Amino acid sequence: MIKYRPATAADFELTLQLKAHSIKPYISEIWGWDDAVQLEYHKHDFVAEHMQIILDRHDQEIGLIDKVETRKLIFIKSILIDHSVQRSGIGTKVMNDIIQHALLADKPIELQVFKINIIAKKFYQKLGFIIKGHTALHYQMIYKNGEIV
């Protein structure tokens, strides 16, 4: 069982650590990991109002969801799960919760995933996302009511 709580400004350090404990290998491979650079990016990108902290059944903070919802769509900026609990079904539960919300709201979900993160790409495709475009580093993916778009 997982739960969610809204992020607050006090979660700045926690969210930075979750980033390091989840996607550092991919960032290291693409650009190289530099703690000072990542801190500056995080200062720029941290918007607590867009985030939820993922909690396990013991209320331990194990991940985060960073998403923006507009009248027309849900854009997932990040879903980060601490490496210690990855591949345990938490990401699937989180995504199924988001998909259910999107279906009820009749909104598509968009996200992007690093091209080198083959596991994440396959994960999203298994859930019904399709690739709608790409950049040099990312696949841009969409889920729309389970339909091919």
Image (tube, rainbow, N blue to C red):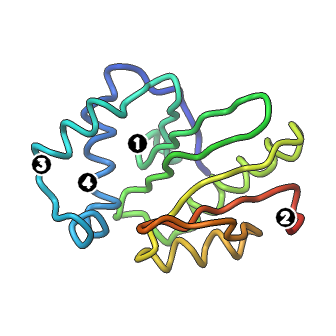
Q: Point out residue 38 in the picture as x, y percentages from the top left corner.
A: 20, 46
Q: Point out residue 12 in the picture as x, y percentages from the top left corner.
A: 30, 29
Which sits earlier in the primary sequence, circle 3 or circle 2?
A: 3
Identify the residue under disc 3.
35
Identify the residue under disc 4.
20
- In the rendered view, tell whether residue 1 sits above or below residue 61: below
Identify the residue under disc 1.
61
For label 2, count other residues whose C-alpha is less than 10 Å away and answer few (under 14), some (14-19) or many (20+).
Answer: few
Q: CA distance from mark 3 to mark 4?
A: 9 Å
Residue at disc 4, secondary structure: helix
53 or 28: which is nearer to us?
A: 28
Say if mark 3 contacts mark 2, CB within 8 Å: no
Residue lying farthest to the top in this orientation: 9
Taking the spot 67% from the left edge, 52% from the top edge, the residue there is 110
Which sits earlier in the primary sequence, circle 4 or circle 2?
A: 4
Say if mark 4 contacts mark 1, CB within 8 Å: no
Say if mark 3 contacts mark 4, CB within 8 Å: no
Q: Point out residue 69 in the picture as x, y percentages from the top left corner.
A: 67, 33
Which sits earlier in the primary sequence, circle 4 or circle 1?
A: 4
- Amino acid residing under circle 2: Val
Which sits earlier in the primary sequence, circle 1 or circle 3?
A: 3
